Image (cartoon, rainbow, N blue to C red):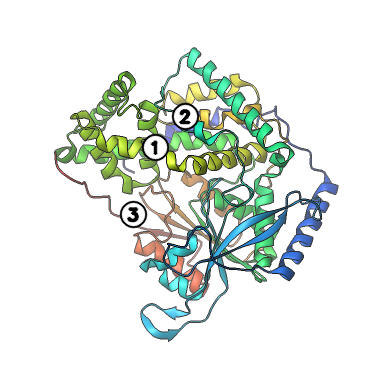
Amino acid sequence: MRAAALYSAAGALLLAGLTAVPADGAPDAAGPRRAVAERYGTAVAAARAAAAGISFGRCPDAEDLPGSMVCGTVEVPLDYTRPYGEQIELAVSRVEATRRDPHHSERKVPRQGALVFNPGGPGGSGRYFPLIGLMPGWKRIAGAYDLVGYDPRGVGRSAPLSCQDPGHFFKGPSMAPAHPSETYKRERVARAKAYARGCAERNGAALRHHHSLNNARDLDVLRAALGEDRLTFMGASYGTYFGAVYATLFPSHVRRMVFDAPVDPDPGRVWYRNNLAQSAAFEGRWADFREWIARHHDTYGLGRTSAAVLRSYERARARLAEEPAGGKVGPGQLQGAFLQAGYYDDYWPHRARALSDYLRGDPRQLIAQAGPVTRVAAEAENASAVYTAVECNDAPWPTDWRVWDRDATRLSRVAPFETWDNVWTNLPCAFWSAPRQRPLDVRTGPGELPPTLILAAERDAAAPYEGALELHRRLAGSVLVTERDAGTHGIAGGPNGCVNGYFETYLLEGRLPGRHAACAGRPEPEPSGGK
């Protein structure tokens, strides 16, 4: 494999010595009676939704968008043990199947029902997903399926959560030390405590009901409201996790499921250890990016080796610490922009150009790419609140700061790029007041679940490949398609024709290859511009 094999070798060995399931922060002890009540509550809510359906009409915030998207709402219980109690509305969008073959415009194709999508997060909105049917690569699927998106509970227009004033969400310019001082750590601990307190104060008792188990139950209510006896679902990233939870809870309600960029569903890794693994994997992806820049030194002038490119990056960090670009972009914003490049290699040429220009005295591209976009502050703050609530509620977390400090200090010695920033993102979970769920043992036996499709890039850092292997082991009859030597986070409908062939054949015909299949990686991005 290209670049540093950190995660598969040194990183994996190191992670084996770090904290497993924390002994403190005990989960909410949901006994058998609660489980029975939740099953009953889900059945009640689904029956009610099936009878009511969804009244679709004009989308209030999409008048200027192309296509024929319509919007509606479906009611779900805030608390599934009280199905007749407080209800919240989920915002749903749909574009009906065209029933046309894009290659033969006069040929009609049969409608296969609704394809429901979740983009992950937690905290991602899927309301604009149906518009993807306008893209050439999706037209065959859009011919056969109603494309359905929605905002999960807490997101966007679905009873949104908030943990702080959105006007204060984008703090910048900020620092992002790879090896923080004790003073900086104390500051971040205080900030995490304040954020957790803000979540509790702004959301009250409702906060405890935002977790993956309820996201899966909501999905079954949505299925019923759409009039679907069995669900066809596609989840990306975190969407694969609660999709797998759904498959475990409601296997007989599944028609077809696509898991794109799956996260590790092992209950012992949700979510503390998964975040450690993610930080280790990002170090390898960061090395991939640096090696690509080095191969294009003639274009960017940032160094002919990975080490030389790293020195250029560190030089920019030091300069930004002294004088933030445009008064907005400090080391924290630089790190955030380059972290995005770890998710999607389409960003590589743009980020490399911005870094090159900045070091030559032109900060405009760096400011444009890394600066805070204040017009989306409310949306970003909402997404952060939902992410935090779901991850903190889903499972036990260490409540002793010394555990976090020990594990991150060890990991940052070999994976400094993302380790500490990942800690600061999740640290409110150490001080969370809502009760924790016990993660479901995601697992289906032979014949319990229809065949499902798992898609994974071998060097995905946001969802390390080991998670795809684990999900494949746990879902009997699943098929894993791997994009070799590639690291883009989410590969369905992208530029890889081999991946898309398996994806389309499964959704349109229900056919899958053997238990495993592999596709050659996509071409690397082309560099842009000259020195």
- Residue 20 in percent (x, y) is at 61, 32
Residue 291 seen by the camera: no
Residue 394 seen by the camera: yes
Disc 1 residue crowd, few under 14, some 14–19, many 20+, Cα 10 Å: some
User: Image point 33% across, 39% down: which residue?
Assistant: 369
Please report contact status of discs 3 and 1: CB closer than 8 Å, yes or no.
Answer: no
| Residue at the extreme right of the image, as rendered | 33
- Residue 225 in percent (x, y) is at 67, 66
Tag nearer the camera, 3 or 1: 1
Tag nearer the camera, 3 or 2: 2
Disc 3 or 2, which lies upstream in sequence? Answer: 2
The residue labelled by disc 3 is 521
Distance in Å between CA atoms under marks 3 and 1: 21 Å
User: Image point 49% across, 69% down: which residue?
Assistant: 506
| Residue at the extreme bottom of the image, as rendered | 106
- Residue 489 in percent (x, y) is at 43, 49
Distance in Å between CA atoms under marks 2 and 1: 10 Å
User: Image point 76% across, 66% down: which residue?
Assistant: 47
The residue labelled by disc 1 is 339
Q: Amino acid at mark 2?
A: Asp
